[in-house]
Amino acid sequence: MSAGGAEAGDKPESVLRDFLKSEAAGGILLIAAAALAMLAANLPGVSEAYFAALHFATGPELGHGPMTVHLWINDGLMALFFLLVGLEIKRELVDGQLASWERRRLPFVAAAAGMIVPALIYLAVTRGSPGLGAGWAIPAATDIAFAIGVLALLGSRAPASLKLFLTTVAIVDDMGAVAIIALAYTAHISLAALAGAAVVLAAMLLLNRLGVVRLWPYLLLAVLLWVLVFLSGVHATIAGVAAAMTIPIREDEHRSPLHRLEHGLHPWSAYLIVPLFGFANAGVSLTGVSPGVLLAPLPLGVALGLFLGKQIGIFGSIWIAVKTGFARRPGKAGWTQIYGVALLAGIGFTMSLFIGGLAFPGRPELVDEVKIGVLAGSILSALAGYLVLRFAPRRSLSIATTQSASPPSASSEPTQPVDVQP
């Protein structure tokens, strides 16, 4: 829905929901970029150039040594992607499918179980190998970009509510992974930088409360917030989600600041940032690797944690929550589709690789084993999840509609520029 085509009182179209619903092109581009990265990392004469480009230092040093191309992509550009996803999550919390506490319960419970069970499986597999316990968090997080890319390929076979549910679960466990990194794997945290970030975030919230609807003050402060979070030692992408929570939203008004920023970020995220991210992170050299390495404790623990742990934790927690009446399952989604999404949550890639490097510093042989385990678990999860969702029976609209609460009427919504904070 275009800005000019929205009538007064119409519910503004959600950009990310519309993208996930109909634009498989972004997902295809992402997966193609990941496949190209694997080729580039393993072709003689090309792999050297590929890795040299990623480690090329450019720009100012921001407290962590040289800023490489890889670092700019992962900590800089991906903060914009997380900003976009944060905007969508906030929109749903304020004026959408997650607007009530009842609807918020399920994603948070699923995310928590989807982090705990993989960690337990990893520890069970590696318990007899001294020194490997530090990698317990490697299979904890879902790679939202790759998982959503697979869902995009399925088109209408994956209901929009299920895609939003996976996005919410992935965001929650990514934030959990960031918290784990800060508490368990960060060598040192700059309390001064964290305090500065808190002050900037408070200033953004104050602008919101004062009814400021121009975007530029928020964007300037968001850049400063990103710098301070980066300098603090905490993963900088958390700044994108935090900044999104401060952007004002006028309920049922298409031109509110949140909707304008969402529309502006969407094409850059879908067709540049996310594919570039996939190309920079999916390339893993397989030189000298034999199939037998998959049976070693470290790669086996990572792979099983992702493939088995995620599906058991997420699907099991959803089943228990629904059967006990604690929460309702996503609208328009049957149990087979929910199981398929639980499988897709086992795509670990980026955060898993990142945590692997932190868990075994100065141990390149173990980091290589982590990469093999992450690749194996993620590929198995992607293929199994795709096949399950591809052949899952579709739910009837009439049944699903009864499970989805209708949004509040426009007449009952406030029209003040200051949003309702989730």
Image: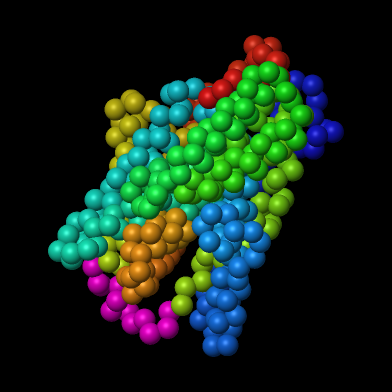
Residue 411 lies in quadrant: top right
Rendered view: 276 above or below 345: below
User: Residue 132 in magenta?
Assistant: no
View extreme (front): residue:
192
Nearest the viewer among 18 and 75 is 75
Identity of the residue furthest to the bottom in this view: 44
Q: Is residue 215 left or right of residue 188?
A: right
Residue at the (62%, 62%) spot, across then down = 276
Where residue 43 sits in the image (x, y, percent)?
54, 84
Which residue is drawn at the image coordinates 30% and 73% (left, top)? 294
Relative to 187, 396 lies left or right? right
Coloring scheme used: rainbow
Region of the chain picked out in magenta, as a range: 286-297
User: Can you give x and y, in whole percent of width and height, for residue 120 in the image?
Assistant: 24, 51
Q: Residue furthest top?
A: 412
Q: Is residue 145 left or right of residue 276?
A: left
Q: How many marks?
A: 0
Q: Nearer the viewer, residue 355 or 91?
A: 355
Q: Residue at x 34, y 59 (%)?
A: 359
Q: Nearer the viewer, residue 316 or 70?
A: 70
Tell me what residue is drawn at x 63 percent, y 47 percent. 80
- Residue 248 shows in the view: yes
Q: Quadrant of the N terminus?
A: top right
The location of residue 168, given as percent across then percent down, is 49, 39
